[in-house]
Amino acid sequence: MITLGIDPGTRHLGWGVVRAEANRIFHVAHGVINAGATLSLAERLQIIDDQLGAVIEKYRPSVGSVETLFFHKDPQAAAKLGHARGVVLLNLARASVIVAEYPPAHVKRAIAGKGNADKRQVALMIRALLALPVTPSADAADALALAVTHCRRAPLDSALEARRSGLPAHPALAQLLRGKRRGGIIARGVHS
Amino acid sequence: MITLGIDPGTRHLGWGVVRAEANRIFHVAHGVINAGATLSLAERLQIIDDQLGAVIEKYRPSVGSVETLFFHKDPQAAAKLGHARGVVLLNLARASVIVAEYPPAHVKRAIAGKGNADKRQVALMIRALLALPVTPSADAADALALAVTHCRRAPLDSALEARRSGLPAHPALAQLLRGKRRGGIIARGVHS
């Protein structure tokens, strides 16, 4: 499964692609789309659209992992972020990529073990988890963190859903449910 | 000059096209893009993108007139509106359409004579100003109001800018500046 994590912003948009294979997560690519501070908002959105479209075209993810919508207290920041996020969701919908959403605190807890981890801690953990030669920039690290969180959560969520529905659990899913008790820090491999 | 007014929303997006010719404003077309309440936000944005793209392709406006960004107090509403507005701005940028922005109170004052006019008053005034056979829906009327506001304001703003810069005023612009003193309610014709 190829997952694209996206950390939207109208000036800097981080993206990160990972591949979940058997029980491991591999780094594929990451980067930041810099839309330029001197351009108008409309022009910046066009740059994001062009470049994010090219990323999706190149890596063909099956899932796009983004932060949940409502966590900003400042309406101006929320509206600006909404513009970039709108272009992100549009690109995912156009390419028939499934959208998965996670709250920021959930991502931080999944990657760095605590919901209030700072950006530096997340970036360092992402470097270690994905065996990257250098620490990625904060925007790209946040995007990779979203992608990794999805790879780890998706089979677990399916298992929990199956249990809630009373469906018989697949042995691998039962293993996942047991694994959940280990809590906190994400393991290098993901059991799928 | 063809102007497209747009009133963004993630469920209903109003649009209206007017043509300013010599000293009059003519209605060209208007409508509402209904993105459907049952679809995901990403799917709704794709519908908006497709249908608004078709409107721009058909009417080829030189200017897109939209409300200014920051007037919502509720971060959730601001973020949601931001998504639709992002797709709107993207479509305008893609087609090289100039973006003009007006505060809602400014539009209401320009159309209905007071900054706190309600949607019904704006719709009735738009019907009268553009000699429409029936009152347009609130979303389409707001979009037409934005387009008409731009047609009326744009030459005036140029004239004021010229005067501030100390440039010699074109006779037509001088006439506009005198016309400004008439204030309030928009006249049927626009002097350009």
Image (cartoon, coloured by chain):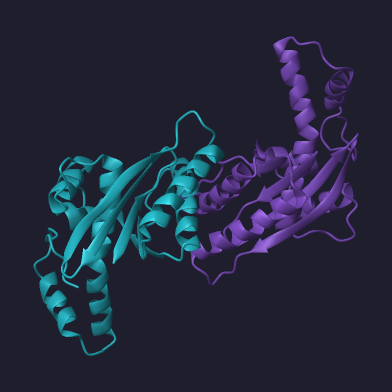
Chain colours: A purple, B cyan
| x and y percentages locating residue B141 in the rendered image | 25, 46
Looking at the image, residue B157 sits to the left or right of residue A75; the answer is left
Which residue is at 51% across, 49% downward?
A78
| x and y percentages locating residue B125 in the rendered image | 15, 48
- Which quarter shows the N terminus of chain A? top right
Question: Residue reaching furthest front?
Answer: B58
- Which quarter shows the C terminus of chain A? top right
* Front in this rendered view, residue A78 or A150: A150
Question: Residue reaching furthest left?
Answer: B182
User: Does residue B69 appear anywhere in the picture?
Assistant: no
| x and y percentages locating residue A8 in the rendered image | 62, 52
Q: Residue A134 falls in which quadrant of the image?
A: bottom right
Figure disc tally: 0
Which residue is at 18% across, 49% downward?
B126
User: Does residue A97 appear anywhere in the picture?
Assistant: yes
Which residue is at 11% across, 61% downward?
B187
Q: Residue B138 falls in which quadrant of the image?
A: top left
Looking at the image, residue B185 sits to the left or right of residue B90; the answer is left
* Front in this rendered view, residue A180 or B172: B172
| x and y percentages locating residue B104 in the rendered image | 29, 53
Looking at the image, residue B111 sits to the left or right of residue B33; the answer is left
